[in-house]
Image (tube, rainbow, N blue to C red):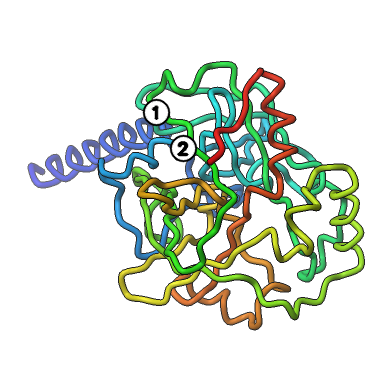
Amino acid sequence: MKIFNFCFLFIIFILITSCFDNSRINKNYFIYSDKNKKVVSENYIYNGKIVSKEFKNSDSTVELISHDGNNSFSRCSGVVISRNYILTAAHCVYNRKLQKTYEFSYLNNLGNEIVRSEKIYPHPTYILAYDNNSINNISFADLALVEFNENLELYGLKIAEISEKVDYEQKILSFGYGNITDYPLFQNNKKRYAYSSIAKISSNIEYLEYDLIRFNKAKIDGFIDSEKVREIKDTFLIMEIKNVNEGQTCVGDSGGPQFINLKEKNFLIGITHGLDFNLHESSEIYKSCKNKKSLSTLIFPYFNWINNVVMQKNEKLILY
């Protein structure tokens, strides 16, 4: 009888403890559910290291949660480019299948503060309708701006300085949030960094006619600077692991920044985009983050569009 009572009390204790833990987790983090699979993405940098204080540029990197107002959300990274604006990937805040922008975004991992967005601006070219069933569409212009009423510097965040100069002999420095597991369920995400080798996309790319139409229209409308880029491929660069001490952005690090060192200072040149089958030679890249090539969306082709948005709050980009 005593053994039975002890076992019964032990089970009750476990149940109470579990409920406490889950309520605490639910308060701070979203939970992945196998039942409805609402999660869009998880973040991690393969072979990345937790950011330490020597990386001052990491203060401009944020974790961005975007919501549709119901149960669906995406979790990505972003970078502060002015007092009131975050730059991120458009696919983090816009659902192409539903042709709908998420209702709102907010910044996570700012202590006890939750900073909610005022407006979301996906790039106009990105949100044009396209064939959702085709893997050959090229998702260029994968950028979005998230506007906040608050001055983001008041939360300890720093504004990233931007450059259009790219030195392909250098390694690129990426930042992003997350864990090194496929589904970081209840674990606290940490900001990580990695250095990667970079390269240009080869010139033998075959574009779909529809992609070319979208690209030319974007140049005519002034959404892409026609003087700075001639082809779609010129709006990207490739990141890959070539040495054991290098890392790589992976699924869900979208929107996180890439920096390059110029005159002993790091400048923002791109944000994590992801994969486009048509820009690679083989589908083998999908099998492992270790071996895959990731794409970074270069920022300089979109300076005009970005400036036109941030000027609504009388702000300008800090350019090198």
User: Is 133 left, or right, of 243 in this rendering?
Assistant: right
Place of residue 249 in the rendered image (x, y in percent of width and height, measured from the top left) = 47, 60
The quarter of the displayed image where residue 216 is located = bottom right
Q: Which mark is residue 110?
A: 1
Q: Which mark is residue 62?
A: 2
Q: Residues within 10 Å of mark 1 (few under 14, many from 20)?
A: few
Closer-to-camera residue (142/311): 311
Place of residue 246 in the rendered image (x, y in percent of width and height, measured from the top left) = 36, 68
User: Is 272 left, or right, of 2 in this rendering?
Assistant: right
Q: Name the residue furthest left.
A: 2
Q: Is residue 70 above or below residue 275?
A: above
Q: Is residue 196 above or below residue 143?
A: below
Instruction: State the CA–CA distance, disc 2 to disc 1.
Output: 9 Å
* Amino acid at pointer 2: Val
Answer yes or no: do the residues labelled 2 and 1 have beta carbons within 8 Å?
yes
User: Is 13 left, or right, of 246 in this rendering?
Assistant: left
Q: Does the rendering let one see residue 216?
A: yes
Q: Is residue 119 above or below residue 46?
A: above
Closer-to-camera residue (98/220): 220
The quarter of the displayed image where residue 135 is located = bottom right
User: Could you tell me which residue is drawn at 81 percent across and 60 percent down?
Assistant: 132
* Amino acid at pointer 1: Leu
Query: Which secondary structure lies at badge 2?
Result: strand
Q: Does the rendering let one see residue 35?
A: no
Query: Which secondary structure lies at badge 1?
Result: strand
Place of residue 35 in the rendered image (x, y in percent of width and height, measured from the top left) = 58, 52
User: Could you tell me which residue is drawn at 7 percent across and 42 percent down?
Assistant: 2
